[in-house]
Amino acid sequence: MKILVINSGSSSLKFQVIDTDTEEVLAKGQCERIGIDGVFNYQTGGGIKIKETCPMKDHKEAVDRILRTLVDKEQGVIGDYAEIDVVGHRLVHGGEKFTGSVVITDEVLDVMRQCNDLAPLHNPANIIGVKACQELMPDTLMVGVFDTAFNQTMEPKAFLYGLPYRFYEKHKIRRYGFHGISHKYVSRRAAEFMGQRPDRVKTIVCHLGNGASICAVKYGRVIDNSMGFTPLEGLVMGTRCGDVDAGALEYLSKKENLDFPQIMNILNQESGVLGISKNLSSDFRELKDAEIKYNDTAALAREIFAYRVAKYIGSYAAAMNGVDNIVFTAGVGENDSDIREEICSYLEFLGITIDEVKNREQGEAVRISDGTSRVNVLVIKTNEELEIAREAAELVRGLKKEE
Ligand code: ADP
């Protein structure tokens, strides 16, 4: 099956065409600065590359540009639109309604709109991407794969906050957890790589990118996720603060005369390793360069980040009463061997020992723990697009069987 995977943001739209029979990426790219000046990036498995400015007034024009390129005689990878069996959309927030992937219907879009308040930056942009595809490919099936769905197996003891229960009943205030598509892909790939059955292992996935979250996956089901009602909770991230005492925020608002939107902006955009490093950078590579030059706050930012990750791993090992695999993924997790080493230095009590040479290797999947380690520590490249394509194909195969 050929699946067009779409990840639509407010001013950008990423895409990939994946043949799920071979899992080959036929083409991929992104439209950026939609509604501004427009930049189109495209490359094919055969080596064709395009990068050009291309005005796109809205998402429909962006999708149109993608489709025209995909069927182009010289640059394209398919003969016509009908060769695309399904469009798989990454959708961020499905609330409690969606526990798996769905065929996108008008009812699904209505439910998603009801979740807009839960993810005001993401859901409306996702819906715009779906609508654009529906208009240009009215006969093609659209499937939605939610970032929150995999986390829906959490039990109330994990997803409820210590707030009055009525706020859960009335407003659905609870932990949802995010990065579900990545956590699902990576936890399964880890089991496959180690020759284990996913329903027999306890895995902690550390998705450490600009946004970062940790997920405890026991026997194939999520039991906890460090992100909460919004992606703000949990780890110290690139620019997000992670866990913080709400009492400190009230104090801060009084001392600095700040209202809620201002505080939220600080917590989301000005905090994390960026804020701790006195605005030096949210990028771990730049922080490392600064640390080497004895920049104290850059070193402190990385230290705080690693410490928080280690604390979550410890707590999730307790939550699952053990752990078989710990997996690092995403930009920082896949590339920053020093951070991985520092995190693992807290975990000797779990019987973890790291092979320093392996830890510096690059690859799609690498086991960095040594032969004596009681827990497997792995680095696995995440692949959310492939996970979306797989799920979309699986859903369609299921529908065909039913017919
Ligand atoms: P997101 O998808 O959340 O934007 P990514 O998973 O792409 O994030 O991660 C981006 C982050 O990964 C960058 O901000 C940078 O800090 C980090 N990163 C990327 N490459 C490296 C590297 N070689 N060493 C350390 N950190 C890296």
Image (spheres, rainbow, N blue to C red):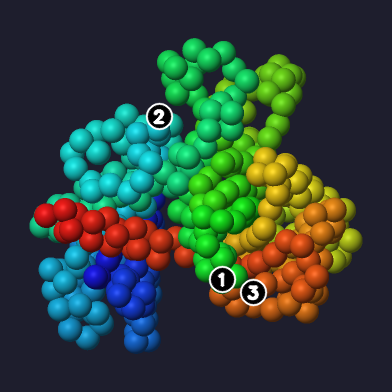
Crowd rating for badge 1 (residues with CA inside 10 Å; few <14, some 14–19, many 20+): few
Left or right: 149 with respect to 249? left
> How far apart are labels 3 and 2 at the CA level?
40 Å
**According to the image, label 1 marks what residue?**
195
Residue 78 location, x and y as percent?
A: 20, 77
Left or right: 100 with respect to 327? left
Label 2: which secondary element: helix
> How far apart are labels 3 and 1 at the CA level?
14 Å
Residue at 28% over, 62% down: 393
**According to the image, label 2 marks what residue?**
117
Q: Reading the chain from its start, which is encountered first: label 3 or label 1?
A: 1
Left or right: 302 with respect to 217? right
Using the image, tell me which numbered label, if any, was put on residue 35. Answer: none
**Residue 236 occupies which quadrant of the picture?**
top right
Residue at 54% over, 51% down: 219
**Residue 23 occupies which quadrant of the picture?**
bottom left
What quarter of the picture does the N terminus occupy?
A: bottom left
Label 1: which secondary element: loop
Q: Amino acid at mark 1?
A: Gly
Residue at 19% over, 65% down: 85
Of residues 376 and 28, the one nearer the viewer is: 376
Residue 403 location, x and y as percent?
A: 11, 55
**Is any atom of residue 6 visible in this view?**
no
**According to the image, label 3 marks what residue?**
366
> How far apart are labels 1 and 2 at the CA level?
42 Å
Residue 137 location, x and y as percent?
A: 14, 58
Q: Amino acid at mark 2?
A: Asp
